[in-house]
Amino acid sequence: MKTQKFQTGRVSLIAFSHFIHDIYTSCLAPLLPLIIEKLSLTLSQAGLLSTVMQIPALFNPFIGLFADNKGLARWLVILAPTLTAIPMSLLLSASSYYMLLVLLFMAGISVALYHVPSPVLIANYSGDRKGRGMSIYMTGGEAARAAGPMFAVAAVSFLGADHFYLIMSFAVLTSILLYFTLEKEKTTTIKKSGSLKTAFHEIKHVLVPLSGILCARAFMHASMGIFLTVLVERQTNSLWLGGAALTLYEAFGVAGVLSAGTFSDWMGRQRVLFWVLTIAPVSILSFVFTTGALQIIMLAVTGFTVLSTTPVMLAIIQENAKDNPSAANGLFMMTSFAARAIAVLLAGIIGDIAGLENMFIISALIGFSAIPFLLKLKKNIL
């Protein structure tokens, strides 16, 4: 039974597990320059790495349906941090490109197992303040991506590539903590027999326009989240500056995530999405064409806007998914991950053909195409 009371302790605990889980997946981008150099990869091959990690997201709806019917959300949240950390901690030990693909595919499976049921638990524990709950939950993920670049670079510096695998110990300890803590809690997942068809019809009026927004946002998300370190490292010849740039981008993303969902509880979901989706592509273009302090400011604005949309969209999905919340979230997450996976691959190809800076410009221009879908969403949620 869902409660209307906002349960701060439970929401914060799951947000913490989100932080630990995602700090491992955030290691790929800052380590990319080292991986490219070690294995002599092209930008297209580098983009494919992230795409392969997104492939298991195609099974998100089935994972969600399974979680709804069997009530396994708690176990998935407990196990996923460790299951993700193991392959991600072995990236620098990979001796070939194909081994990298296998490791990232394994990590992608665990990523899917975590991200489908965890927002459902957050929604259950948030009562009528789902926007706030999703903001806190997503803050854990964005904080991980903010800390992840410097964490990865520092780990390589102090442990060396040969001992990078030791970082998996943090995830193991987190899974143990979750086991002993969540074991005492009664799961709120509804156990019943549902179907993907039912879940889709329940949310299709918002999922269709949200899918368009996700596709438009994916190129901005891919260029900044995956290739920012490569761009800065090539411009400055400094891996540390590349990691610092991504950290700044993600740090302001934390601020955007933390505020967007909460604001949408009282300002309206569509209004918040309109402002951030309008400003985001403008800030990316400004980042590319400016230098110095102004460029740093534009990087911060980009992080705040590009990354702040997810908690608002998650809240919209959960508000419209009454009978099949995990399956509905699985459909949304499948669309989100698939859109980003394809965008990363295409962005890499564009970078190889047109150049890295032009890839950022094209990604920003594509971002403007989210506006028509946003207007369609307004009609459906009013």
Image (spheres, rainbow, N blue to C red):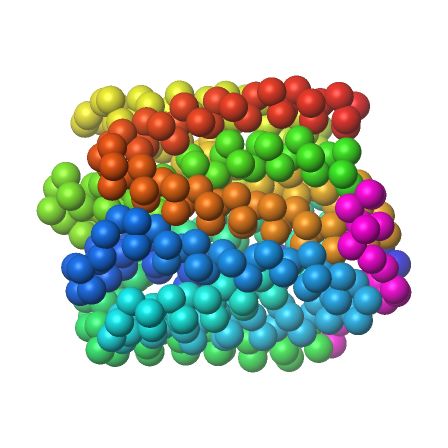
Q: How many marks?
A: 0
313 sits left or right of 250 in the view: right
Observer-nearest of 120 and 222: 222
Q: Quadrant of the N terminus?
A: bottom right
Residue located at (30% from left, 62% from top): 152
Which residue is situated farthest in the left direction here?
A: 237
Residue located at (48% from left, 22% from top): 368
Range of residues picked out in magenta? 184-202
Residue 285, by quadrant, is top left
Residue located at (40% from left, 55% from top): 50
Can the viewer see residue 187 in this picture?
no
339 sits left or right of 32 in the view: right
Can the viewer see residue 206 in this picture?
yes
The image position of residue 4, as x and y in percent, is 83, 48
Q: Measured along the vertical axis of the image, is residue 299 above or below residue 338?
A: above
Q: Measured along the vertical axis of the image, is residue 224 above or below residue 378?
A: below
The image position of residue 147, as x and y in percent, is 37, 54
Residue located at (62% from left, 37% from top): 211
Tell me, yes or no, whether the highlighted magenta stretch contains residue 190.
Answer: yes
Tell me, yes or no, whether the highlighted magenta stretch contains residue 171.
Answer: no
The image position of residue 317, as x and y in percent, is 72, 42
Q: Quadrant of the C terminus?
A: top right
**Magenta segment main secondary structure:** loop
The image position of residue 144, as x and y in percent, is 44, 55
